[in-house]
Image (spheres, rainbow, N blue to C red):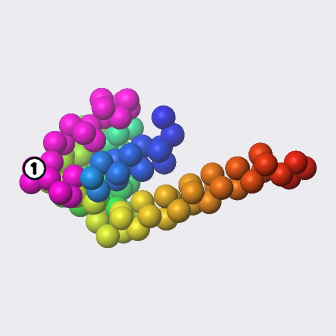
Amino acid sequence: MDNFKVIYKILKNLEKSMDLEEFDKSLIGYQEMNLTEPRWNRIIAMMVNNGLISGVDVRNTFDCDYPKVTLIRPEITLKGLEYLEENSTMRKIADTAKGIKEIVPGL
């Protein structure tokens, strides 16, 4: 799966969970995302480091070549919401452009 699609899906699940009293952490787990554990840990660490999500403990240890992630109480941040909005808008624009290209010959 494309890394950006994984990021989008994780953010979308966290955004949907804002109405829930308790979030099911398995909704964004590596198995549910069809990822290896090392790739999932790296993606989650990148998301934390870029301010897209909070409520996650990221540790680098000597005995592991990738960051170890523990989901404490994962939540989407304002920056994460902005990322979702920008990517939703760009997807709509791309879909519209694709539709126009299909209608208008020679584009």
Which picture quadrant has residue 93?
A: bottom right
**Label total for image:** 1
Which picture quadrant has residue 28?
A: top left
Q: At which x and y percent is residue 58? A: 24, 52
Q: Residue at point 21% right, 58% down?
A: 18
Q: Nearer the viewer, residue 17 or 102?
A: 102
Toward the right, the furthest residue is 106
Q: Residue at point 9% right, 54% down?
A: 21
Q: At which x and y percent is residue 13? A: 30, 48
Q: Nearer the viewer, residue 55 or 85?
A: 85
Q: Amino acid at mark 1?
A: Glu
Horizontally, residue 6 falls left or right of residue 28, namely: right
Query: As displayed, is residue 67 above or below residue 83?
Result: above
Q: Residue at point 36% right, 64% down?
A: 81
Q: Nearer the viewer, residue 51 or 75?
A: 75
Residue beneath disc 1? 22
5 part of magenta stretch: no
Toward the left, the furthest residue is 21
Disc 1 crowd, CA 10 A, few/some/many (<14, 14-19, 20+) = few
Horizontally, residue 93 falls left or right of residue 65, namely: right
Q: Nearer the viewer, residue 67 or 10?
A: 10
Q: At which x and y percent is residue 19? A: 18, 57
Q: Secondary structure at mark 1?
A: loop
Horizontally, residue 78 falls left or right of residue 84, namely: left
Toward the front, the furthest residue is 103
Horizontally, residue 106 falls left or right of residue 6, namely: right
Q: At which x and y percent is residue 23? A: 15, 48
Which picture quadrant has residue 56?
A: bottom left
Query: As displayed, is residue 58 above or below residue 37?
Result: below
Residue 70: tell me if it is visible.
Answer: yes
Extent of the magenta region: 17-38
